[in-house]
Image (cartoon, rainbow, N blue to C red):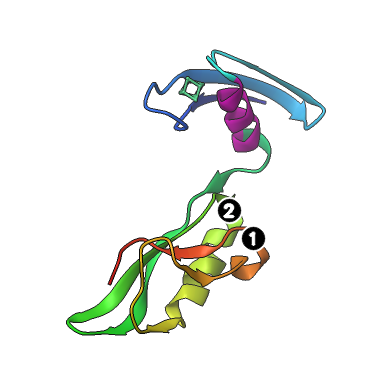
Amino acid sequence: MKKTITCTVCPRGCEIEAEYTSAADIAVKGHSCPRGERYAKDECLAPKRVFTSSVRIDAPGRRMLPVRTSAPVAKDMLIPCAEAAHGIRVEGHVNVGDVIRRDFLGTGADLVASMTL
Ligand code: SF4
């Protein structure tokens, strides 16, 4: 299988060609650094994304707190993450980067606040 991938790891946006049949047989070209090679392989075999959403917060003048995962999570976990985030309610003062849920849904990434409220 062949795939053309635009690397989003940095602003350079290299266009990477990937050809693969399995995890053991994958060739990539067009990347400018090892991070791009890793990104392209992940996109072929196990794509990941940073999950972003908002959760309810009890804070003066605010009802919603923007949140994100501290690292990319498997793409097929985005909907379960959205469903779980819907049920989260935060109380009190929150600083940007505060952990709202550690190892969110077992993804290995924490759910963290994207804003100080
Ligand atoms: S391959 Fe490397 S240099 Fe190119 S966009 Fe990805 S991270 Fe940036």
Query: At 46% across and 83% down in the image, what residue appears?
Result: 87
Whether the residues at callouts 1 and 2 have beta carbons within 8 Å, the answer is: yes
- Residue 93: image location, x then y, percent: 33, 78
Numbered label attached to residue 73: 2
Query: At 44% across and 66% down in the image, what residue appears?
Result: 98
- Residue 73: image location, x then y, percent: 58, 53
Three-letter code, disc 1: Thr
Residue, far right: 24
Closer-to-camera residue (80/103):
103
- Residue 47: image location, x then y, percent: 59, 43
Task: State the predominant SS element of the stretch in magenta.
Answer: helix
On screen, residue 31 versus residue 41, left or right, reads: left
Query: For the residue labelled by badge 1, is the local secondary structure a helix, a strand or a loop?
Result: loop
Region in magenta:
34-43
On screen, residue 32 versus residue 65, left or right, reads: right
Numbered label attached to residue 107: 1
Closer-to-camera residue (27/106):
106
Query: At 20% across and 84% down in the image, what residue appears?
Result: 60
Q: Which of the two discs, 1 and 2, labels the residue nearer the N terminus? A: 2
On screen, residue 43 versus residue 88, left or right, reads: right
Q: Categorize mark 2 by other alpha carbons within 10 Å: few (<14), some (14-19), many (20+).
A: many
Looking at the image, residue 70 lies above or below residue 32: below
- Residue 25: image location, x then y, percent: 79, 24
Looking at the image, residue 11 lies above or below residue 73: above
Three-letter code, disc 2: Val
Q: For the residue with label 1, is its CB less than 8 Å from the closest atom of ligand 1?
A: no
Inspect the magenta stretch and tell me whether residue 38 lies in it.
yes
Numbered label attached to residue 37: none
Closer-to-camera residue (104/116):
116
